[in-house]
């Protein structure tokens, strides 16, 4: 218990030091800009303090946008997980299905998903919440599908043979062997997907801005601030996205440590 | 339970077994019989098809020809009275000792829970139920696999090089344990191994197979099996030499014979 406490303390300290180092680097770059560039140009990179000062004055506005972005991202990730993981596990575990569907995955995976915007608009409504979430799903889905498929396909054969010999049915094999065995790789895929998902939600929020402005999202907030030359607000928005990412990475790590605790034993 | 029964009643019957993967023949007309309560060690060159034979006996692979019967019934799928222990990865790393030992068992059925607890106690695993395989020593992992087989109340125990990864002393202790359990529970034991000493220590009969496609080269009778002291006896060493000679006929020497340097 004491060792676990020490571990958490070390991790928190490491995170705090990283954040401090990042803020220090940012401040240094901002000073360099101000020393070397025309003052009007140097405004594009305000220091971290100036960006942080935006929060007390606009916390409600930024908070609402943060909520909007977080909700779209989380719903998009959840739908992708529910669709991609079971499908990936089945494709990975059944060789015939793998041979049949892998060419389809290899063809569609590298296509930039932005090209599907018009289809999403027609199917889910121009600028609708559904189209934004749909775009996140489209971007994240393939990453999770490939992670789950590869993990299921590379599972040691002896695990499955052992379970089959113990009398487990095909469905039970998925629940007791394929899913838990693939879970660590799915979490790695989820971490990569989180970065992709944030990128997708940002694009979706800036591309078409219709509907309620209050929860339009950090993408929309940053874009609007750019238009008004409010660079402190731009960086406040970027900071908020960074914090959202940090919180979600932390959540994923906690979930992994709970669901894959066998991997972290000493 | 007393001594194992070595009556003539056949438990495992393999007749003219054939297995092909695409164009490759793996097993070629293999025939074997193991009496109820008897033990058979299968030994042969690497990759000859020993593990495939065990998978067929476990009902995990269907042969392309021939006949396999256990207890008089054809083997078509895994059966609750046949337990299989695999080499290294037989235990699921994400399941605890208890979850591994009870995998696939009908725990609500009367007596099953009691049987699992007794098996864990008999194998010295009491108190380790909540540990994961990564927290166990090599010997403890093997004992969990054995506990699962005992909890299953298996009539046939199939082992695929189960002790290969153990250090010499743990291997010897575990071999003694397998011998003790075989004598006490009276199950029929089939063991696939690379280890000649292990085959001679545990197999009342030793089937020597040829390189792929596997054929039966010799069936060595080994009546001395049954006590821990056997491994110290002259009969044991003689049998080891006999099996080694048969195996050497099957495999080309790994180190080519060197010519004496010319003067």
Image (cartoon, coloured by chain):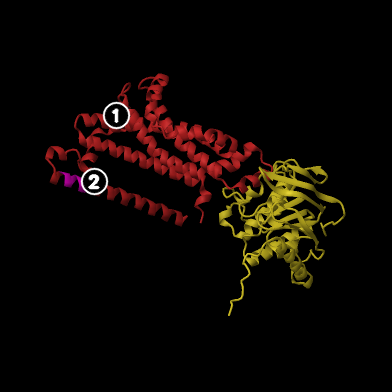
Chain colours: A red, B yellow
Residue at numbered disc 2: A26
Q: Give percent across and percent down for residue A192.
A: 41, 41
Q: Earlier in the sequence, mark 2 or mark 1?
A: 2
Q: Identify which residue, B100 or B114, lies in the foreground.
A: B100
A215 magenta-colored = no
Which quadrant holds residue A214? top left
In which quadrant will I find the C terminus of chain B?
bottom right
Q: Identify which residue, A173 or B64, lies in the foreground.
A: B64
Identify whether B7 is placed above or below B255: above
Residue at numbered disc 1: A220
Which class describes the residues within 10 Å of circle 1: few (<14), some (14-19), or many (20+)? Answer: many
- Magenta stretch prevailing secondary structure: helix
Secondary element type, mark 2: helix
Q: Do dots 2 and 1 share one subunit? A: yes
A30 magenta-colored = yes
Q: Which residue range is magenta in the image?
A: A27-33
Residue positioned most to the front? B263
Q: Identify which residue, B108 or A232, lies in the foreground.
A: A232
Q: Residue at x 69, y 42 (%)?
A: A167
**Chain holding disc 1:** A
Contact between marks 2 and 1 (CB within 8 A): the answer is no
Q: Is residue B176 visible?
A: no
Secondary element type, mark 1: helix
Q: Give percent across and percent down for residue B1.
A: 81, 56
**Chain holding disc 2:** A
Q: Residue at x 49, y 44 (%)?
A: A185
Which quadrant holds residue B223? bottom right
User: Distance between the Cα atoms at labels 2 and 1?
Assistant: 23 Å
Q: Give percent across and percent down for residue A77.
A: 43, 34
């Amino acid at each position: 218990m004491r060792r676990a406490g020490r571990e958490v303390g070390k991790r928190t300290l490491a995170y705090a030091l990283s954040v401090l180092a990042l803020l220090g680097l940012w401040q240094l770059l901002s000073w360099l800009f101000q020393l070397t560039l025309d003052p009007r140009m140097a405004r594009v990179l305000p220091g971290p303090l100036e960006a942080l000062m935006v929060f007390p004055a606009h916390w409600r506005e930024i908070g609402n946008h943060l909520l909007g972005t977080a909700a779209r991202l989380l719903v998009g990730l959840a739908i992708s997980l529910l669709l991609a993981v079971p499908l990936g596990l089945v494709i990975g575990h059944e060789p015939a299905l793998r041979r049949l569907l892998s060419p389809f995955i290899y063809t569609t995976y590298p296509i930039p998903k932005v090209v599907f915007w018009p289809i999403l608009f027609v199917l889910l409504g121009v600028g609708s919440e559904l189209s934004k979430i749909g775009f996140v799903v489209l971007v994240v889905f393939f990453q999770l599908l490939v992670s789950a498929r590869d993990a299921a396909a590379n599972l040691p054969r002896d695990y499955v043979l052992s379970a089959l010999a113990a009398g487990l049915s095909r469905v039970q094999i998925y629940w007791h062997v394929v899913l838990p065995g693939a879970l660590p790789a799915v979490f790695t895929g989820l971490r990569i997907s989180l970065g992709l998902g944030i990128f997708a939600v940002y694009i979706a929020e800036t591309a078409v801005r219709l509907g309620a402005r209050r929860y339009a999202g950090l993408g929309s907030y940053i874009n609007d601030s750019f238009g008004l030359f409010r660079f402190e607000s731009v960086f406040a928005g970027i900071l908020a996205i960074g914090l959202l990412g940090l919180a979600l990475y932390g959540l994923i790590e906690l979930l992994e440590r709970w669901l894959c605790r066998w991997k972290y034993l000493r | 339970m007393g001594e194992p029964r070595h009556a003539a009643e056949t438990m495992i019957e393999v007749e003219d077994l054939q297995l092909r993967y695409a164009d490759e023949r793996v097993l070629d007309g293999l025939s074997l019989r193991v009496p109820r309560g008897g033990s058979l060690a299968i030994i042969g060159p690497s990759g000859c098809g020993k593990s495939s034979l065990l998978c067929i006996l476990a009902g995990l692979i269907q042969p392309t020809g021939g006949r396999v019967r256990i207890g008089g019934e054809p083997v078509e799928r895994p059966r609750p009275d046949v337990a299989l222990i695999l080499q290294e990865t037989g235990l699921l790393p994400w399941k605890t000792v208890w979850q591994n030992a009870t995998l696939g068992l009908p725990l609500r059925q009367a007596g099953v829970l009691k049987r699992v607890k007794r098996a864990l106690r008999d194998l010295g695993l009491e108190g380790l139920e909540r540990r994961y395989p990564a927290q166990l020593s090599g010997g403890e992992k093997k004992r969990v696999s054995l506990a699962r087989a005992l909890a299953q109340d298996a009539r046939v125990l199939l082992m695929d090089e189960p002790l290969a990864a153990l250090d010499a002393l743990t291997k010897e202790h575990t071999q003694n344990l397998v011998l003790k359990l075989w004598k006490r529970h009276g199950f029929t034991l089939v063991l696939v191994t690379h280890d000649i000493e292990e085959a001679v220590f545990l197999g009342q009969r030793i089937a020597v197979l040829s390189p792929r496609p596997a054929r039966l080269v010799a069936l060595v009778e080994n009546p001395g099996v049954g006590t821990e002291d056997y491994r110290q006896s002259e009969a044991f060493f003689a049998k080891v030499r006999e099996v080694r000679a048969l195996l050497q006929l099957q495999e080309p020497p790994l180190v080519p014979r060197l010519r004496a340097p010319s003067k």
